Image (cartoon, helix red, strand yellow):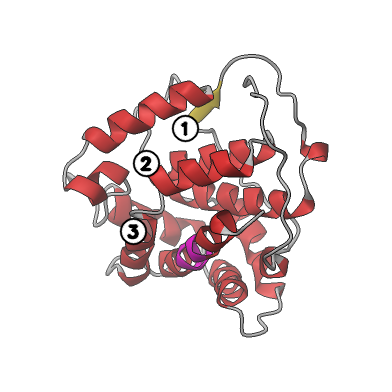
Amino acid sequence: MITQRQSDSISSDAIETDSIKSDPIEIEQESMVEQRGVEPIATIDDVAEEQLYRSSVYKVLAGLLRTAPDNNALEQVSAFAAIEQEGDELALAMSMLGLSAKASDANSVDDEFHALFIGLGRGELMPYASWYLTGFLMEKPLSALRDELAALGFERSENVHEPEDHIAALCEVMAMMIDEGYALHQQANFFTTHMSNWLNHFFTDLSQADSAIFYRSVGRFGQAFSTFEKQYLTMPV
């Protein structure tokens, strides 16, 4: 697991989190990033409820962007359809994602995933920070990310060949930081440095991609959640 450093406790009630409240969902898949070190000091029971919901959203995004979901994963995500929309963009995006999952099957989503992210040579989209920030893969943003991951106690899983700046890997790191009780300022620094400067661009592209059907709703959900996170992580505590 990971060595947890002495840090400020996570506490905040200045922003509404009701719109992301549903039964936490975690798509069962092999992670791209691992924690290393000793057993964590914080446990799930130590983390505030609102943090569990944030972590759950990151895990859902990581699962959907890491590999094509199977029918079991789609069934789990379809539970979002029951969320009350109430005019809130995040709640609406979650509900639409659930409805899209209900109307989708694993085979068609698998074809869609390959067209978007794999393709012949490359997919329609390149889900990497370096690509969005520099126009090339394996550039300085990846080097800076690797340095910070090492400092935080994370490393790429041995059987994973994707660079660590893949969007799914970054979502995994945020989920683990929340679950392990990293201070809010540490989460904010990681998000601001490595994610917020390209995340919305990527999710906008995904929501408008020619190859996307189910994944358009994933893109809209990602856009709404990244906007929420920017507000959440910059509010006074």
**First in sequence: mark 2 or mark 3?**
2
Q: Amino acid at mark 2?
A: His
90 horizontally vs 84: left or right: left
Q: Which mark is residue 228?
A: none
| Span highlighted in magenta in the image | 221-227
Q: Position of residue 97 (x, y in %)?
A: 55, 69
Main SS of residues in magenta: helix
Please report the residue visible at 38 percent of the width from the left and 25 percent of the height from the top.
147
Is 222 magenta? The answer is yes
Q: Position of residue 37 (x, y in %)?
A: 60, 14
Q: Secondary structure at mark 2?
A: loop
Q: Spatial distance from mark 2 to mark 3, Cα to Cα?
A: 11 Å
100 horizontally vs 196: left or right: right
Q: Position of residue 78 (x, y in %)?
A: 63, 65
Q: Amino acid at mark 3?
A: Phe
**First in sequence: mark 1 or mark 2?**
1
Q: Position of residue 99 (x, y in %)?
A: 59, 74
Q: Is residue 5 above or below residue 29?
A: above
Q: Spatial distance from mark 1 to mark 2, Cα to Cα?
A: 9 Å
Disc 1: which residue: 32
Q: Is residue 99 above or below residue 170?
A: below
Quadrant in the picture for residue 205: bottom left
Q: Nearer the viewer, residue 26 or 189?
A: 189
Disc 2: which residue: 166
Q: Secondary structure at mark 1?
A: loop
Q: Amino acid at mark 1?
A: Met
Q: Are marks 1 and 2 in contact (CB under 8 Å)?
A: yes
Disc 3: which residue: 202
- The outermost residue toward the top is 38
Please report the residue visible at 48 percent of the width from the left and 60 percent of the height from the top.
226
Q: Secondary structure at mark 3?
A: helix
